[in-house]
Image: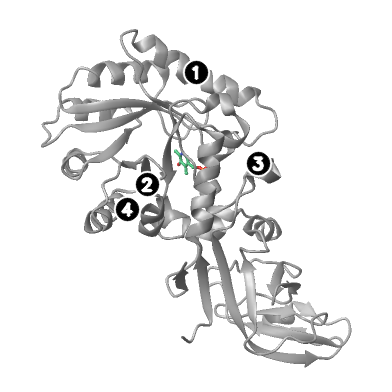
């Protein structure tokens, strides 16, 4: 098949990474984060690969939840699907109930609306507390009220208590420990009769804060192969799931002081060779990548030279004289961590992954 610009997605790497989560958090259930189309990897593909290894999936928008439910139903896969902070109204509640989508309730208004609703089937809710990020979530007082309002309703199948850390990748664990106590102590105080499942840990906390795993962990980026803490041991190393590749379309010599690309941002210091690659910002490669951002040509390192344009980018292959039209260039993934490319571009792997656009072919292994 004729391919110029594509991502390769490895189910083996994905399953490997899920096994690492399982190894690090052996007692916790796993809610795999597949928001933003599975961090750009394909939410339904991720769910199909992992549904036997994990205990549920979470997305950010109702449309994502509905699409995932439809795809999984087609494949006869039953799975818990949780919707993160969405705007809750009467219609959303009916849809969640009808399609068996768990809902995160992050404010008291939504809890009141839910308490007063008649639903076709009971639904499971995850009550969210604000423990310091100040983005979504209830205060301790609101959380307590919401819990009391919902815990006695027959249309609520179950209640989970959840929150989200602001600084889990910080090398100083004390803030995360404090934040974790805010919810765990409140949760314990709300009922002596039973324990409500608790969930706080994202990837960084799964890796760096084993005492904050509680009942459900919520790995995102680590499933896709990036360790946000950079502290995993070699024995638990993650594997990149996505490798972004493109072909060399042209190779040319340029003379000393010639410029390359728009505004000739890159200037040759001496005679150089430039390869033009079939990837640009319309494919999801960052336009603000500076000269010197690494790429791999046939497995060897070269550097971005010149401004990334919509469909094309240029790289300096003066040190790789065998480079030819048709060669494969890896923009990130196997052999070149997305986090490293991100650090050159002032961003993180999360953003690189989620910005891959539709015209980039997906090749699933
Ligand atoms: C995205 C998200 C996660 C996963 O975060 P990672 O850093 O990718 O592991 C966990 N919890 C919530 C609420 C999220 O929105």
Task: Check residue 52 in the rendering and tell me which mark sits there, or answer none.
Answer: 2
Q: Are marks 1 and 2 in contact (CB under 8 Å)?
A: no
- Rendering coords of residue 87 (x, y %): 30, 41
Mark 4 or mark 2, which has the lower sequence index? 2
Q: Nearer the viewer, mark 3 or mark 2?
A: 2
Disc on the earlier residue, 4 or 1: 4
Within 10 angstroms of label 3, few (less than 14), some, or many (20 or more) residues? some
Marks 4 and 2: CB-CB under 8 Å? no
CA–CA distance in space, label 3 to label 2? 27 Å
* Mark 1 C-beta closer than 8 Å to ligand 1: no
Residue 29 drawn above or below residue 292: above
Q: Within 8 Å: ligand 1 and the Cβ of disc 3?
A: no
Res. 62 mark: none
Q: Is residue 130 left or right of residue 173?
A: left
Name the residue that disc number 4 marks. Answer: 64
> Viewed as shown, does residue 193 lie left or right of 354?
left
Which of the two labelled residues, at mark 4 and mark 3, occupies the earlier sequence position? 4
């Amino acid at each position: 098949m004729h391919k110029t610009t594509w991502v390769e997605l490895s189910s083996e790497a994905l399953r490997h990474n899920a096994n690492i989560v399982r190894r690090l958090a052996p007692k916790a259930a796993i809610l795999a984060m597949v928001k933003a189309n599975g961090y750009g990897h394909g939410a339904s593909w991720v769910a199909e690969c992992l549904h036997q290894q994990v205990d549920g999936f979470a997305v950010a928008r109702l449309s994502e939840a509905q699409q995932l439910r439809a795809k999984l139903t087609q494949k006869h896969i039953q799975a818990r699907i949780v919707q993160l902070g969405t705007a809750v109204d009467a219609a959303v509640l009916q849809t969640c109930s009808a399609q068996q989508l768990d809902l995160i309730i992050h404010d008291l208004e939504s809890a009141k609306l839910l308490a007063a609703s008649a639903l076709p089937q009971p639904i499971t809710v995850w009550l969210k507390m604000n423990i310091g990020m100040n983005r979504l979530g209830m205060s301790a007082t609101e959380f307590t009220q919401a819990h009391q309002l919902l815990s006695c309703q027959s249309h609520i199948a179950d209640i989970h208590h959840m929150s989200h850390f602001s600084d889990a990748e910080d090398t100083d664990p004390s803030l995360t420990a404090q934040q974790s106590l805010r919810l765990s102590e409140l949760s314990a105080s709300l009922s002596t009769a039973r324990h409500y499942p608790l969930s706080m840990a994202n990837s960084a906390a799964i890796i760096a804060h084993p005492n904050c795993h509680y009942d459900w962990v919520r790995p995102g980026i680590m499933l896709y192969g990036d360790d946000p803490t950079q502290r995993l041991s070699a024995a638990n190393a993650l594997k990149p799931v996505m490798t972004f590749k493109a072909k060399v379309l042209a190779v040319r010599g340029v003379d000393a002081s010639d410029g390359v690309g728009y505004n000739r941002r890159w200037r040759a210091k001496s005679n150089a060779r430039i390869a033009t690659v079939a990837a640009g910002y319309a494919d999801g490669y960052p336009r603000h990548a500076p000269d010197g951002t690494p790429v791999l040509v046939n497995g060897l390192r070269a550097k971005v030279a010149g401004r990334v344009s919509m469909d094309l980018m240029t790289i300096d292959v003066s040190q790789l004289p065998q480079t030819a039209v048709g060669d494969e260039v890896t923009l990130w993934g196997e052999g070149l961590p997305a986090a490293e490319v991100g650090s050159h571009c002032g961003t993180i792997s999360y953003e690189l992954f989620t910005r891959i656009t539709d015209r980039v072919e997906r090749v699933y292994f």
